[in-house]
Amino acid sequence: MLKRLILLCALLLTAHSAVALTIYRFTDANGVVSFTDKPTRGAVVMKPREMIVENFDSQVHIEVTKKEGVHSLYVRNDTYAPVEVEMQLTGVKNVLGVFDKPIRRMVQSRSYLRFVMISPKDPGQAMVYAPKLRYSLGDPGLQSVGYRYPLPWRGGPFRISQGPDGKFSHSGVRSRYAIDIAMPEGTPIIAARAGTVIKTENGQSGRGADPSGNFVRILHDDGTMGVYLHLMQGSVIVKEGQRVSVGTDLGRSGNTGNSTGPHLHFVVQRNAGLGLESIPYQFAEHVDMLPNFAVGGN
């Protein structure tokens, strides 16, 4: 198993420098799973996906109150982070008070805000409209502060299996500066920076439907967010809304979601304006890269 993990991590290192490396997953007659960069009969192509795809639709949503023919449209934010929201009305008929351009506002944590009040042009006819909502966690107006991150795990030493801008799965806007660290399942994962836990997932086993697997998202005081992905099922011990300090236990490393081997995927993000983007960061300690066995490294 260790040899297969090392080979896989080496292939991911190749993906970091290659323009378009294809990785194949092969299961032999004995059920042993292997990874290779060479086509093999019966192998399937590993398809990378953007890692960070959490859905907050149940926590950020529109509420409409109606009184004497007037409709008031509110946005409710049930998350533990401020949210940048943009609302627009489409398909409008028989409506007064419609805005020409989308309205963009900040809705603070655990609060709601009225965006618009509308009424019918003809009181005898029904209003027709469809509200559209876009949103992103975090306040884009905050300035991120330079910070060197302590290693977000206990044990090791471990090595980096895929670095920033890795072509296998670190090429998307939300993941381009992420770092993957190969480590055994069950390694203690700890907070690398103080903040508030704003989202967790703890029930996913194996690949599941969410490419992030089980994870913890922490909002820092400067508006940036640290995200710890692919954690072991049932291992997350922090709760949304909880304040954590550097070194607080979060959970255990795993191999869940869009993961090709046991590792921690750690990324720092900020709201760049109605969208999260990963940003560069540094660890406070040096972490070696795995040897690139796929191209004859040692």
Image (spheres, grey):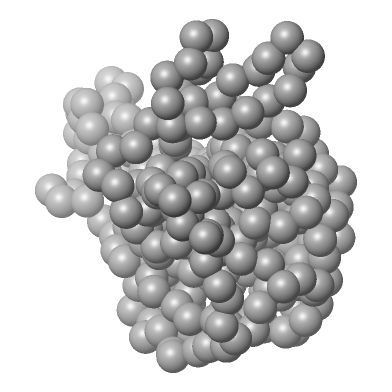
Residue 249 appears in view: yes
- Image-based side of 28 in relation to 142, left or right: right
Question: Which residue: 49% across, 26% down?
Answer: 24
Q: Is residue 64 above or below residue 38?
A: below
- Along the horizontal axis of the image, is 8 left or right of 275? right
Tell me where residue 207 appears, x and y as whole percent: 66, 31
* Foreground of the two, 263 or 133: 263
Q: Residue at x 57, y 42 (%)?
A: 8
Q: Say which residue appears at 78% left-offset and 14% top-offset.
A: 30
Does 222 sit above or below residue 227? below
Using the rendered image of the protein, determine whether residue 75 is visible from the camera's viewpoint. Answer: no
Q: Which residue shows up at 22% across the image and 51% down it?
A: 102
| 85 lies left or right of 151 | left
Quarter of the image with the N terminus is top right
Residue 158: image quadrant is bottom right
Q: x, y (%) of residue 195? A: 65, 79
In the picture, residue 190 is in which quadrant? bottom right
